[in-house]
């Protein structure tokens, strides 16, 4: 590992064993791209030093050389391990695409919600504070029930007393997703295409809107914010919401709605 000093600061050229990579066409390979994140370790990754690739030279890669920038050069990696061999691991995700979002999160002071989960990675998720402060609130599930138009109320935080999945027109995984989203202040629902993610999202929204008196405040606006990756996905979601919500209460921001 040898230091170099480009205009951007101190980088290091590292030599790696390329004996196993003879068949790789570095000119078209997606490995070791500019901006990619690599981890360096001398102790089987008990400790890790992070670096980003700052220069990708095809001829250099063929010879087993790579220029990187150590993200925390102050940690003494060179002083403590300068003469040792490192093991290098590269993330499969392209780090440059996430880097500036992660840096932005670090710069948010005091107003960042859910830091205990997003930043500190806590795995014990609390119920929403607006439910905890009410003791044992009962939600009206009638909009989701398949066979009744009557008011059907259940204790929302006691999921064992909820209507059954079949009564809500859900399979078990969709049912679990609905319960988690309603009873936890932070949740992520994922799945392959056509597994019902949008369908469950509409159920969540419909249940929240029907019971808005529990989470809306009288002093501040409490809108539901829906963010979609594409205009098509947003239109698809809004079509479902429009069936259960006053259109005058919806503000759409983005490209022109193709359904209008």
Image (spheres, rainbow, N blue to C red):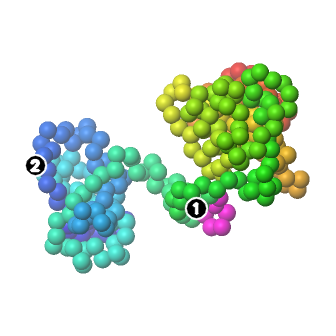
Per the image, label 2 sits on a secondary structure element best described as loop
Q: How many marks?
A: 2
Q: Residue at x 10, y 49 (%)?
A: 19
Mark 1, residue position: 116
Q: Earlier in the sequence, mark 1 or mark 2?
A: 2
Q: Nearer the viewer, residue 182 or 44?
A: 182
Q: Where is the N terminus found, in terms of image quarters?
A: bottom left
Report the span colored magenta: 108-113
Q: Position of residue 97 (x, y in %)?
A: 45, 48
Give percent across and percent down for residue 107.
Answer: 57, 65
219 magenta-colored? no
Residue 112 within the segment the image draws in magenta: yes
| Residue positioned 23% across, 67% down in the render | 43
Callout 1 secondary element: helix
- Tell me, for residue 4, which label it has, or none: none
Mark 2 — residue?
Answer: 19
Q: How far across and how far down the image is residue 69, in percent?
A: 32, 63
Image height of 200 relative to 121, above or below: above
The correct choice, above or below, for 212 with respect to 220 in the image is: above
The residue at the far right in this view is 218
Q: Nearer the viewer, mark 1 or mark 2?
A: 1
Marks 1 and 2, how far apart at CA:
44 Å
| Residue at x 21%, y 47% (from the top left corner) | 58
Can residue 109 be seen here? The reply is yes
Please give the name of the residue rendered at 24% of the width and 78% of the height, measured from the top-left corner. Answer: 79
Instruction: Answer yes or no: is residue 230 visible.
Output: no
């Amino acid at each position: 590992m040898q230091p170099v000093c480009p205009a951007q600061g101190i980088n290091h050229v590292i030599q790696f064993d390329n004996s196993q990579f003879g068949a790789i066409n570095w000119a078209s390979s997606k490995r070791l791209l500019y901006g990619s994140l690599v981890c360096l370790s001398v102790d089987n990754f008990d400790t890790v030093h992070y670096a980003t690739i700052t220069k990708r030279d095809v001829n250099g890669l063929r010879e087993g050389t790579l220029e990187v920038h150590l993200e925390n050069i102050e940690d003494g990696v060179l002083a403590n391990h300068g003469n040792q061999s490192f093991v290098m691991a590269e993330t499969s995700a392209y780090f440059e695409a996430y880097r500036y979002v992660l840096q932005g999160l670090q710069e948010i002071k005091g107003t960042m919600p859910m830091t205990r989960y997003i930043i500190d990675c806590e795995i014990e998720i609390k119920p929403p504070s607006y439910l905890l402060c009410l003791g044992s609130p009962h939600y009206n599930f009638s909009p989701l029930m398949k066979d009744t138009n009557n008011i059907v109320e259940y204790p929302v935080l006691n999921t064992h007393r909820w209507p059954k999945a079949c009564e809500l027109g859900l399979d078990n995984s969709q049912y679990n997703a609905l319960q988690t989203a309603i009873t936890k202040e932070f949740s992520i629902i994922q799945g392959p295409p056509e597994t019902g993610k949008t369908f469950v999202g509409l159920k969540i929204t419909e249940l929240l809107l029907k019971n808005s008196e529990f989470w809306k405040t009288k002093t501040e606006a409490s809108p539901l914010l829906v963010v979609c990756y594409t205009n098509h996905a947003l239109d698809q979601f809004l079509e479902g919401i429009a069936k259960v919500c006053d259109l005058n209460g919806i503000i759409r921001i983005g490209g022109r709605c193709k359904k209008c």
